[in-house]
């Protein structure tokens, strides 16, 4: 059974491929499945969730990424932010701190150290904006 970290990384791979090839994420997901790559249920849920909330996610990321538009972000950083923002806003089974930590770790591992700091800052602003007063 794949870990959630592996599921996130696979979702990032699929969504990144979709972004850079300008293809529907569901088509890319189906190609992965057809190629007999093991795709976890968690991965599928993330890919479908990001796809269905893409406009909302991009608007929030664009607002939180001070002085950056969504189109100017590196494709990999944009993809990591989309997955994490989806988790923060729409996955009650994923604590906000976990979504942010996983995204920062992915950015540092897959992109650059600067990307890790940038992703942390953007997600921190999004998380603070999504908190509901008690």
Image (cartoon, rainbow, N blue to C red):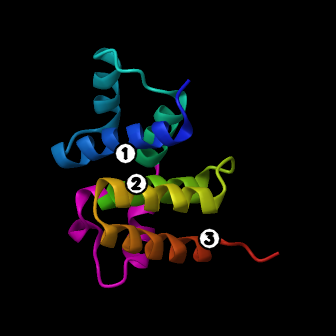
The percent coordinates of residue 106 (x first, y second) are 40, 54
Neighbourhood count class around disc 3 (C-alpha, 10 Å): few under 14, some 14–19, many 20 upward: few
> Which label lies toward us, 2 or 1?
2
Q: Quadrant of the N terminus?
A: top right
Could you tell me how far apart the alpha carbons at marks 1 and 3 are, in whole angstroms?
Answer: 22 Å
Q: Which label's residue is closer to the chain start, 2 or 1?
A: 1
Question: Quick one: SS at disc 1?
Answer: helix
Q: Which label's residue is closer to the chain start, 3 or 2?
A: 2
The residue to which callout 3 is attached is 130
At x 28% / y 38%, what residue is drawn?
A: 24
At x 33% / y 15%, what residue is drawn?
A: 36
Give the quadrant of residue 76: bottom left
> Which label lies toward us, 1 or 3?
1
Magenta region includes residue 49: no
The answer to whether 41 is drawn above or below residue 11 in the figure is above
Q: Are marks 2 and 1 in contact (CB under 8 Å)?
A: yes
Q: Which residues are magenta?
A: 53-76
Neighbourhood count class around disc 1 (C-alpha, 10 Å): few under 14, some 14–19, many 20 upward: many
Give the quadrant of residue 114: bottom left
The residue to which callout 2 is attached is 106
């Amino acid at each position: 059974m794949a870990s959630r970290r592996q599921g996130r990384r696979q979702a990032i791979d699929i969504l990144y491929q979709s972004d850079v090839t300008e293809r529907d994420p569901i088509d890319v997901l189906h190609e992965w499945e057809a190629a007999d790559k093991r795709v976890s249920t968690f991965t599928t849920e993330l890919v479908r969730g990001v796809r269905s909330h893409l406009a909302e996610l991009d608007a929030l990321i664009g607002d939180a990424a001070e002085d950056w538009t969504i189109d100017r972000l590196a494709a990999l950083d944009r993809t990591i932010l989309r997955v994490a923002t989806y988790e923060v806003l729409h996955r009650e089974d994923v604590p906000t701190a976990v979504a942010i930590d996983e995204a920062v770790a992915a950015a540092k591992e897959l992109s650059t150290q600067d990307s890790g700091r940038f992703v942390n800052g953007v997600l921190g602003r999004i998380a603070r904006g999504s908190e509901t007063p008690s």
